[in-house]
Image: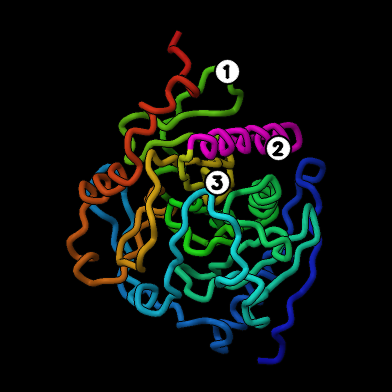
Amino acid sequence: MSQTRPTTYELTSSSTDSRTDPALQRLLESTWSERHDAGVGFRYRLHIERERIAEGKFNFLILLNRKRLTERRQPQAFQLDAPFDPSRFNFTRVDPAEVQLELFAPSPTTILINNSPVTVYHSLVVPDRAGQHSQLLTSGGVRVAFELLLRLPDRRYRIGYNSPGAQASVNHLHLHLLRIDTELYVQRAELLPVRGTPLLHRLADHLPAQGYCFVLRDPTTELEHVCSGLMKLIQALAERQMAHNLFWSWTDLHRGGELRALVFPRVTQCVNKAACSFNAAFLELCGFVSVGEGTDYDRLTEDAIVQALREAQGDVYGMLDGIFPVASAD
């Protein structure tokens, strides 16, 4: 491989400039592909052995990726309020070859390869890496998630986040950037307006997961409000010791449409004791199920997946309805 040194790049604010940035996408994809093809930094070469759509209403995508289970780093065990621990693995310790880009705006952010990828171009977004923040999402992390998806011309890119107690595996602030070529149910899921909170909605009761959604239609007028509202929601969950998963996605994979930022709270926190074949994290909550064992791939049904998601979350609406009530139909 001829080059593994990271490239520096500057993002301009999408609240003042609505253009996409093809150069940024080329850099993300080329720096990932160069390392992947050369076997530099990765624990394995990405290989999806099989994939299928589960029968049912929600079209869960199920993929078999055995190496994700057997080769990935073992998850750390930590809870929502755990402080950053410099003695444990964190992203200041990665091999320099894993660093793809250093972004200097809107705030310093490092893009790393995910060395155990789930999809092509699966990278880690690490806001203020040198600041050594715990895995609680910051305003800078929220903002860069929007900025990246607004800038990338390919609307198949998504961003996800697992908080402590919600399947996060490293207690150092990071988000996941990945390209998913299949439409997921959350892109078109029915939303109900939340009373008193502009741009915030709740997922309809019949859906597989319970969650909330900010909808961004016009970045130049709404981006600041959406980022602020999303941070207030996350802080409200943290105050109640509720772990949470987030997912950013366009509603249309070809034209973009609206940008949705989904939040999936959990009534109780979980502890990651070991890597396992099926976890209820941000991808699974949104309809993308990557498993590491052939038996799970063969036997998983929509009903089984929905049951696992509901058990993982608990009765979120029952706990939060008084805080984020749905607006009445009239």
Find residue 215 and report its horizontal and vertical position in percent: 57, 34
Q: Residue at x 48, y 16 (%)?
A: 327
Name the residue carrying label 1: 196
The answer to whether residue 30 is visible is no
Mark closest to the chain's N terminus, 1 or 3: 1
Q: Circle 2 — which element?
A: helix
Residue at the extreme bottom: 1
Amino acid type of the residue tagged 1 in the rendering: Gly
Q: Which residue is mark 3?
A: 250
- Which disc, if any, is residue 223? 2
Mark 1 and mark 2: Cα distance apart in space: 18 Å
Q: In the image, which residues are magenta? A: 215-240
Amino acid type, callout 3:
Trp
Nearest to N terminus: mark 1 or mark 2: 1
Q: Is residue 4 visible?
A: yes
Which quadrant is the N terminus positioned in?
A: bottom right
